[in-house]
Image: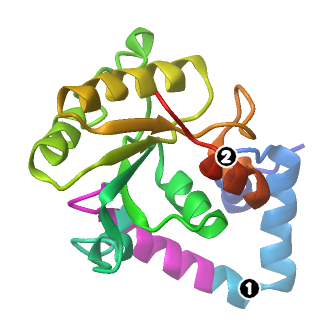
């Protein structure tokens, strides 16, 4: 049974994390209070700073504490390639698992009319401006293999065609219904190597 008071609030707070139920939250809270108070203080300081200082990159929309993230600020990256993903976690997953050295664009979701998420909510107007003005030759559609992810990829592929930009889709290895941030690096590497034109 979950206790009341500050300890109960702490346990309940951990439950806001994905995949963390009451038992896991309780273990985390007790571990920090009984065995690692210094770690708990550092976690609380960094979390407070992150909440106040981290925003979105002005170019690719990933999470960063600067105007431009490290990916966008890197002049060695290829401006002719743009990888389009659903979340900042996908940027990290791809960058750690592949040899991709192009640019990124983060949608922060996927088309889902039933949930009221349309092109405006995904920043597709910003994406279209990039397609109009930049030296883009290929967009790599790395949205998740869900019905909504596929619909989003198809929508963006049509947009790319309008500007004579090649649209490719990451291929084999990513299962239907799979979320990129949970896929191992070998699978992601093969998916990127085997991408196909849409």
Visual colour scheme: rainbow
Viewport quadrant of the N terminus: top right
Q: Secondary structure at mark 1?
A: helix
Count of numbered labels shown in the rendering: 2
Above or below, 168 relative to 155 = below
The picture places residue 142, in percent across and down from the top left corner, at: 51, 41
Q: Which residue, given by chain and number where applicable, does mark 1 sit on?
A: 37
How many angstroms separate mark 1 from mark 2 (CA)?
42 Å
The percent coordinates of residue 117 (x first, y second) are 35, 21
For the point 37% across and 71% down, which residue is it? 71
133 shown above or below 43: above
Q: Residue at x 36, y 28 (%)?
A: 157
* Helix, strand or loop at mark 2: helix
Outermost left residue? 133
Which residue ends up furthest to the top in the rendered image?
A: 114
- In this view, the residue in front, 116 or 71, is 71
Disc 2: which residue:
191
Could you say where residue 104 lies in the image, as x and y percent from the top left?
A: 38, 56
Q: Is residue 159 left or right of residue 166?
A: left
Residue 145 figure quarter: top right
Q: Is residue 12 visible?
A: no
- Front-most of residues 179 and 25: 179
- Span of residues in magenta: 42-60
Counting other residues with Cα less than 10 Å from the Cα at mark 1, is it few (<14), some (14-19), or many (20 or more)?
few
């Amino acid at each position: 049974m979950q206790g009341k008071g500050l300890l109960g609030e702490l346990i309940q707070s951990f439950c806001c994390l994905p995949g963390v139920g009451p038992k896991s939250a309780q273990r985390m809270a007790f571990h920090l209070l009984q065995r690692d108070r210094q770690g708990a203080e550092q976690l609380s300081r960094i979390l407070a700073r992150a909440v106040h200082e981290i925003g979105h990159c002005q170019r690719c929309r990933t999470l960063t504490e600067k105007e431009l993230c490290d990916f966008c600020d890197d002049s060695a990256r290829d401006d002719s390639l743009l990888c389009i993903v659903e979340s900042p976690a996908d940027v990290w997953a791809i960058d750690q698992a592949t040899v991709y050295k192009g640019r990124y664009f983060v949608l922060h979701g996927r088309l889902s009319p039933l949930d009221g998420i349309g092109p405006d909510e995904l920043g597709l107007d910003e994406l279209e401006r990039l397609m109009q003005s930049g030296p883009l030759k290929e967009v790599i559609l790395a949205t998740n293999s869900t019905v909504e992810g596929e619909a989003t990829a198809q929508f963006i592929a049509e947009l790319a065609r309008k500007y004579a930009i090649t649209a490719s889709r990451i291929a084999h290895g990513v299962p239907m219904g799979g979320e990129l941030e949970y896929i191992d690096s070998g699978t992601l590497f093969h998916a990127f190597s085997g991408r196909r034109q849409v």
